[in-house]
Image: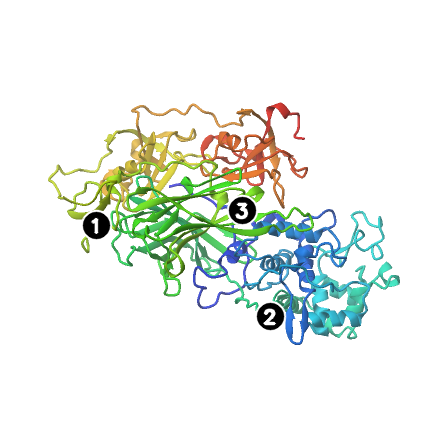
Amino acid sequence: MMSWNIILWGSLLSFGTLATTDPTWPSPNDELEEIMYQVNGYRSRNFGGTVIPCANEASGPGRQNAAEWLRVAFHDVATTTDLGGVRAGGLDGSLQYELTSSDNLGPGFNTTLKFMADYYTSRSSVADLIALGVYYAVRSCGGPVVPVAGGRVDALAGGPIGVPLPQNTAFTFEQQFLRMGFDKTEMIQATACGHTIGGVHDDEFPEIVPVGSTSNGEVPLDSTDAVFDNKVVTEYIAGNTTNPLVVGPSIKATRNSDFKVFSYDGNVTINAMAAATDFNTICATVLQKLIDTVPDGVVLSDPIQPYSVKPVDMQLSLNSGASTMQLNGFIRVRTTDLGGDAVSSLTLDYKDRSGGNNCGNTNCTYTATLLGATQGFDDQFVWFPIDAAISTSTGISSFTLTLTMASGTTQTFDNNGNSYPIQDAILIQKSQSCLFSGTLTVTAAVRNDRKSLPVNTLISYKTPTGNPNLPVPTLKNATVTMTEGDCVGAYTFYTANYTGLGDFAYASKIDVISGSETSALIDDFNSASDLGGTCQAFQNPPPSSMCTTGQISTSPGTSTTLSSSATSSTISISTTSASSSTTVSSTSTSSTAPTETLHHRQTIGEYLLVGCQTESTAAGTRALGDAAFAYDSMTLEDCMNNCTGYVYWGTEYGRECYCGDSLQSTSEKAPITDCNMVCGGDSTEYCGDSNRLELYSTTASQPTPTATLAPKPTVSSYVRVGCYTELSNGRALTGAAYADDAMTLEMCASNCTGFTYWGTEYGRECYCGDTLDSGSTVAPDTDCQVMVCSGNHDEYCGASLRLELYQLATTSSASPQ
């Protein structure tokens, strides 16, 4: 079995020791928690990370992201009013409509909102993202934890003018802060905490920083402008401050606002903040109050904390042949407080569709092995991949999780007594769904006992405003009735199409819904960016005679299977055809056969044993990379059936099965004795070993890979122009975007037909455009020779924040134009 590492791009959040009980999963804040703790080992983007270190200059020289994110929150809150005890405004995202106001000078507001807009969804409001930005801003600069709650509601228009300005008197400042709900002491505290990072710029305030007086147009507010510390206070008290809002030209211009505020109570408050510990404690409190200032009627949640154990991206989908469905995803485990007692394995125990323990021809227990570990500001996590086959006849309704520690102890998590719920009534089929040129096709598998209920898809999508001063796109919803298609065993496919999604089509979220109101079951919040550019046909659909109108029933305590076995069971299946409805019953009985002994099988079905083969040594690749299955009852026959139609298949580690039409070039022949691990489901068969495949092929000869892993000079009518950097706060190519686990250079070229440029990134992403953003620059070719294409391991498909870039041959030149 291969070991994998998760690459940590970004920062994870922590709010200290967890409460006694985890939040119940899924919670209303689940998406915001996901953004907060997102890790990019398998994702394409992260809210935090390399794009927002404290000193990052996203808006230009002398400008720190962190300071601008903190300033965004203050300016958003500052338009609040409290009339007659009724608060309007506050942190409500109104700033997005106020960028042309004289209160909001400088590019940082637009840049910040444009960046955050990528994470704006029906489950993460602009206001919540701004609050999250305060945490990142403070924590990335070494400051304290500012707890973040969820539940803010976005305003639909701008608020009144009223942001405190440097030329105001101290009394005016006091009145403005009172309107926000802050008394005199809190006003002084909030000003000091907000001004410990960043500086004043000559573009916006030439009376304070004369134009041309500095090399980068900025004068820092203290000597450590990229560190959240108490220097803004201690330097002021010591009389050696260079804060331009205390000393310098601001005095003559009466714009020395920090001096006005700090000295307003005779420096009592500012002296009380001089100690580093006191400064951090006060700032955590006052900044939390700032982001928790919301309009009346908005109810915030408790501060969001990381789950001790959290299912991430758990998804069911029908497998080829429709006799099983695959449960894929990850389990994230917080290990911050575990000390040296590491988690060695994780076991998932699931209940069948009826809440019982009848799991048909699969196992109710799945054991996952460690994928990798990640670490952020304050927390550590380990990740376990889930890839379990579930019988469609018996289904799944919930699961619990058990951790086995290195010390031998175990701990079970049952979601606060609720178990982790999962429904199998309606499943989005991502392989049979696709997104191309703004047109979305959604296919869902609906269990046949729910065919009398309506089936719809809800699409949440973004449209640009067309106004550069309104950087946050408009969020829209569309509900489309899905059309019934082919029946595949216990499920029927339904399809819907929607056109006109535009430039942000890749950011759409998709719900597929069976039923309505109290009968509704939903597979929700699926990302359109996970879909390929072409809808694939469902492989090996069962004959129409196997289309069931009810559930396959079995006697209690028996395990049913639709293939021959040594058990005896009776299967009743109601089937339908175009002309009649019948009930078919069949009985299989065990037969006497020669006793098998443990040995390597030379033939399995129509496949011949190639031998023992090493796993791929190329980073991020498998020897067979087209499909994968894993369960504890694996046999050679199971793997062959899973891989029907593929040229090769092989078993590994006793319980894993991999399929492919080609063998990765770095896989090599190994002695047959290296493959000595017994199959989990048949003690007479070998199923490979750790990093060793028991390999079978439709041909008898050892496969010899003919392709060579290397950059391709030309693909279709495009020529390679090199490896180029991605933007830190956007996309280098903005014409269209696709993502597919079967991505190849040829697929990307086909998806981008008609565009001048296209490029692949992160092994599975494809971007198109007629222009390349000037912020994208050439990078060493070796930067793009890190990740192979997920659909062709003999091709390179860029890397993290690196594009393998191609240009239309007729317009190609020495460098992109």
Mark 3 residue element: helix
> Residue 388: x, y in percent?
34, 47
Q: CA distance from mark 2 to mark 1?
A: 57 Å
Q: CA distance from mark 2 to mark 3?
A: 31 Å
Contact? badges 2 and 3 (CB < 8 Å): no
Mark 2 residue element: loop
Q: CA distance from mark 1 to mark 3?
A: 43 Å
Q: Camera-side residue: 395 or 470?
A: 470
Point out which mark residue 559 bears: 1
Which image quarter is the C terminus in?
A: top right
Q: Camera-side residue: 575 or 370?
A: 575
Mark 1 residue element: loop
Q: Which residue is mark 2?
A: 296
The answer to which of marks 2 and 1 sits earlier in the sequence is: 2
Of badges 2 and 1, nearer the viewer stands 2
Q: What's the amino acid at mark 3? A: Ala
Task: Decide if residue 654 is in sight here.
Answer: no
> Residue 574: x, y in percent?
22, 47
Q: Which residue is mark 3?
A: 507
The answer to which of marks 1 and 3 sits earlier in the sequence is: 3
Q: How many residues crowd around disc 1 within 10 Å: few (fewer than 14), some, or many (20 or more)? A: some
Q: What's the amino acid at mark 2? A: Asp
Contact? badges 1 and 3 (CB < 8 Å): no
Instruction: Please give the name of the residue rendered at 70% of the width and 52% of the height, measured from the top-left corner.
Output: 108
Q: How many residues crowd around disc 2 within 10 Å: few (fewer than 14), some, or many (20 or more)? A: few
